[in-house]
Amino acid sequence: MSPSIATNQTILVVGGGIGGMTAALEAAECGKQVILVERNATLGGRTARMNRYFPKMCHPTCGLEINLRRLKGNRNVRVMTMAEVSSVTGRRGDYTIILKLTPRYVNTNCTACGDCAAAVEAEISNPYEYGLSKTRVAYLPHTMAYPMHYVLDPSIIGTADAGKAKAACKYDAIDLDMQAETVELKAGAIVWATGWKPYDAAKIQPYGYDRFANVITSLEFERLADPHGPTGGKLLRPSDGKEAKNIAFIQCAGSRDENHLRHCSRICCMASLKQTHYVREACGESGKSTIYYIDIRVIDRLEDFYRKVQQDPTVSFVKSKVAKIVEDKDGNPVLHGVDTEGYHRYATTHDLVVLAVGMEPETNGIKLPDDLLLDSSGFIEGSHDEGMFGAGAATSPLDVNRSVQSATAAALRAIQVVHKTAAAEGGRP
């Protein structure tokens, strides 16, 4: 790839989740040239792995399908997947970016027929399902993947499965000789829409996430509830595959805690309230959801959603910070703590525990340009030279709706930068 594919009138968007897609589209539909880079094999980010949005409880395909249609129909956007920013140099209006491209081992001839996956035998932990299931080493990330091409896991190279995959492909789409590449490009403004990641639940030692099979995260529960997920939408316990009907939701698992994340992650309360709907749908009146909370934080129009959940007789609330979880002889999690409304101790057994884990920026632990301004939690605030902007959940813990709003604002600010650059150089904005 030549640096000439982009100029100081180009806007680079880093991250292909709902925030990055929105920022790229808003800028492109205003006539700007945009390069959208995503380090994974497909766009969609964590939104693509959700079962439902709150408060409307519709499937994420609602928003993602529209954005994918807009992307496919807009020549101003160039999408680069399996691409990661290695370095950024320069200044506002004149950035030089180095990208590292990871080989997919599948070229654009791919029709997503699936013959390569059928031909191979080895399996890997499925990243789309947060490791709750296995997938073949030749796989399509998910049903709404964009680009709609298969991926070969690097572990296949040099094995018999590599030859089987290549032989099975009728379209000459398997390229086992692909190598990692480094490319350089120019941009006038950069939008960082790098998203968020769940706090590592294993660090919350008293909850035993890494010891007890029936203690899972809210993201894993989201996949269990999805009809296209690893259990076909059945709420099955990881330990024995039995249906879970008595489910505990623990709020602030890693958030608002000086030992973990100091900030409130905002979406966790609404996520758990939403997930009680999954329990009712799967189990009916026999299902039981118990939410252990410090305070329930919902705002504006979401308050109505909270009140509806409060009226559900299958849902109960315990105002308490759970002290610890132990496991009984049958593998059932037992929660210990003090109910602060009445100040009595409890030791309550549940079938399954769901930890509403906090949000931290995906960029934590990654080398970012020195010019970027970060808050105390590592979220992106902007840059000293005012040419780089954060968008979506890269800026703070946000739900999908607010991520889209944030990304639109970032796109408009990036457009202003390239307009001013053109004006300063005597060009036409």
Image (cartoon, rainbow, N blue to C red):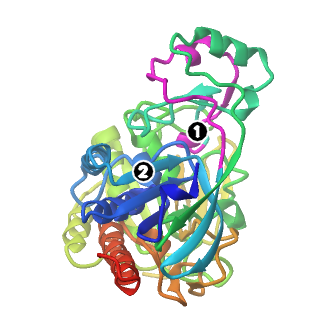
Q: Is residue 89 left or right of residue 399?
A: right
**How many labels, in total?**
2
Decide: is 216 above or below 199: above
User: Where residue 171 sits in the image (x, y, percent)?
Assistant: 51, 14
Q: Chief secondary structure of the magenta span? A: loop
User: Where residue 314 sits in the image (x, y, percent)?
Assistant: 31, 54
Q: Is residue 277 left or right of residue 165?
A: left
| Residue at the image point whose x is 40% and y is 81% from the top | 421
Of labels 1 and 2, earlier in sequence is 2
Residue 350 seen: no
Instruction: Quarter of the image for the C terminus: give it.
Output: bottom left
Asked whether 249 or 18 is in front, the reply is 18
| Disc 2 residue crowd, few under 14, some 14–19, many 20+, Cα 10 Å | some
Amino acid type indicated by mark 1? Leu
Asked whether 225 or 7 is in front, the reply is 7
Decide: is 313 above or below 341: above
State which region is magenta. 101-130
| Disc 1 residue crowd, few under 14, some 14–19, many 20+, Cα 10 Å | some
37 magenta-colored: no
The answer to which image quadrant residue 55 occupies is: bottom left
Q: CA distance from mark 1 to mark 2?
A: 33 Å
| Residue at the image point whose x is 65% and y is 73% from the top | 368
Asked whether 46 or 306 is in front, the reply is 46
- Return the mark for residue 78: 2
User: Where residue 239 sits in the image (x, y, percent)?
Assistant: 63, 37
Residue 173 seen: yes
Asked whether 256 or 180 is in front, the reply is 180
Please name which of the two marks, 1 or 2, marks the residue nearer to the observer: 2
